[in-house]
Amino acid sequence: MAETRRIRVEMLARVEGEGALEVDISDRKVQSVRLSIFEPPRLYEAFLRGRAAAEVPDITARICGICPVAYQMSSAHAIESAFGMEPGPEIRALRRLLYCGEYIESHALHMVMLHAPDFLGFEDGIAMAASHGDLVKRALAAKKAGNTLMCVVGGREIHPINVRLGGFYRLPTRAELSALQPDLARARDDAVGILRWASRFNFPDVERDWELVALRHPTEYPLNEGRIASTSGIDIAADEFDSVFEERHIAHSNALHSVVRARGAYLTGPLARYALNYERLPAHIQALAREAGLGPVCRNPYRSILVRAIETIYVCEEAMRLIATYNPPREAAVPLTPRAGVGAWATEAPRGLLWHRYELDAEGNIRTARIVPPTSQNQPAIEADLLDIATRRIDEPDDVLQLACEAAVRNHDPCISCATHFLKLTVNRR
Amino acid sequence: MTALVIGFGNPDCGDDAAGPLVARLLAGRIAARVLERHGDALALLDVWEGAALLVLVDAAAPMGTPGRIHRLDLTTDLPRELSVGSVHSFGLPEAVALSRRLGTLPPRVVVYAIEGWCFDVGGTVSAAVADAVGTVAERIATELSG
């Protein structure tokens, strides 16, 4: 008689936003896996129409509480591109510094409070704190350093308010930035401690053959700019995105799925950035990666915690370098002259590529807006990951399979709020 | 070792201002540090470490009686169900629970929760909550002077 099983996770923990995971199993075969995002559509792209370009960085920042800088950066760069201007090297450096703060904040929280409990058998980071208090304190201290950097450059730690088209509303002083250096140095050392701690975790031995997609920049580890590249040969400018990638509506999800037109699912995020930009990391950080067991490419999603630690070390050092070389521009923002046009830009949010495209009228008002966040791009790859796990572990009890699926989702630090914008798991066995 | 009062909430989100408004009424009036805070509650762990007594004042979700005052003498964690549900922005229940496990929670913690009605961005404080703000301030002042 055919077996029918249904496993249902009403709320998948430690993932941002509202969604569900449903696994259908019949005749001892996994028939389908659906990552259903039921958080309501937030309609940002629609209500940006008609708004003034200057409002866009502040509006889009509200899409996400953990990566608002990514939204501000992608939108500001895209609109500036449409207006045919570049804000100059000093503004560029200050934007990169702000982005470093967001990475420290986001990665420190995810590595220790959201991801590490999966490897150590704790329900969450709070339960883990009783026996791993030192590491939790180190992560919180690192996160605080990121928060403070965000406050000084961005005006506040959540939803910064100091970013504008052409630059900033207020420039930080050298003294304000220099005061951050000791905490950033400690955060860097804490990230090294977290890397060495996490490198001793018992990682499942899996390799995924995803196409990895990330920005690539000729000289630096990418945050704000670069060409969109992949491990299968994509090498395009941001305005060519639609020629290579396609967004598809999927019935079970309120978030669009993105695929490479020619090949299907792909992955953005830390693993992709690292693989495509390993040679952009300083030699001593590459050595730390090797010491932690990482090669130049990592295709094991569980080891993404190590890659996040490497990136955290990098952005702490990069922030310190940018502060040490800070040269305040003459003006906080370069004046913009609106013109009709189209601008597209991609930056690297902590959880992956964030692409924006705006069409503007001659007065600088938004005619159309498109936003493709990392989680919606990663959904097909996450579903493929889950299908493989459910297939390999089909005979395991429902509660064990459920935990394995939840952990697999958390490997990717998805932000479902961004993609529509959490998670129920349902396994149907028939 | 001192007493610390933290009014927690966003002053620009209607009744969420209850905590900060209580703090403003108490600042300079009582023998305790008085702070206003909002946003990521994890940032509070450093703030309250070392205090002998911690009084947290926060707005509570509507439960049918706007302005109703709940006083909790915390010997255990706050129910996690009270949290607002964003893993990227920890609320007071998570911050208290984490601090207790890290050994940084003050030895005595009192929570005043004021039931709110409307938490709209840019909204004003409802009349019942405004009344409760004054009452809670008086009760804390009395409690700390005893």
Image (cartoon, coloured by chain):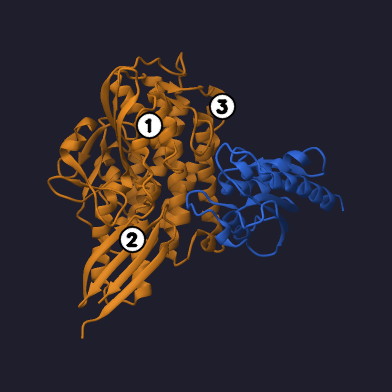
Chain colours: A orange, B blue
Can residue B112 be seen here? yes
Residues beneath discs 2 and 3 located on the same chain = yes
Q: Are marks 1 and 3 on the same chain?
A: yes
- Residue found 70% across the figure and 64% down from its top: B75
According to the image, label 1 marks what residue? A73
Classed neighbour count for the residue bearing mark 2: other residues with Cα under 10 Å, few (<14), some (14–19), many (≥20): some
Mark 3 or mark 2, which is nearer the start of the sequence? 3
Residue A96 image offset from top left, x and y in percent? 40, 30
Q: Is residue B29 left or right of residue A219?
A: right
Q: Quadrant of residue A394?
A: bottom left
Task: Rate crowding at label 3 as few (under 14), some (14 to 19) or many (20 or more) other CA atoms within 10 Å.
Answer: few
User: Which amino acid does the dot numbered 3 rest on?
Assistant: Glu
Residue A176 is labelled as 3
Q: Are marks 2 and 3 in contact (CB under 8 Å)?
A: no
Instruction: Kindly give the residue lying farthest to the bottom in the view shown.
Output: A1
For badge 1, the amino acid type reads: Met
Q: Earlier in the sequence, mark 2 or mark 1?
A: 1
Q: Quadrant of residue A365?
A: top left
Q: Is A388 left or right of A91, judged from the image as shown? A: left
Q: Nearer the viewer, residue A184 or B94?
A: B94
Tags 2 and 1 on a common chain: yes
Q: Which residue lies at the image location 68% right of the left edge and 49% below the top edge?
A: B48
In the image, which disc is placed on residue A408? Answer: 2
Of callouts 1 and 3, the N-terminal one? 1
Which marked residue is nearer to the observer: mark 2 or mark 3?
Answer: 2
Question: Which residue is nearer to you in this view: A400 or B1?
Answer: A400
Q: Position of residue A222 (x, y in %)?
A: 31, 35
Subunit of mark 1?
A
Q: Amino acid at mark 2?
A: Ala
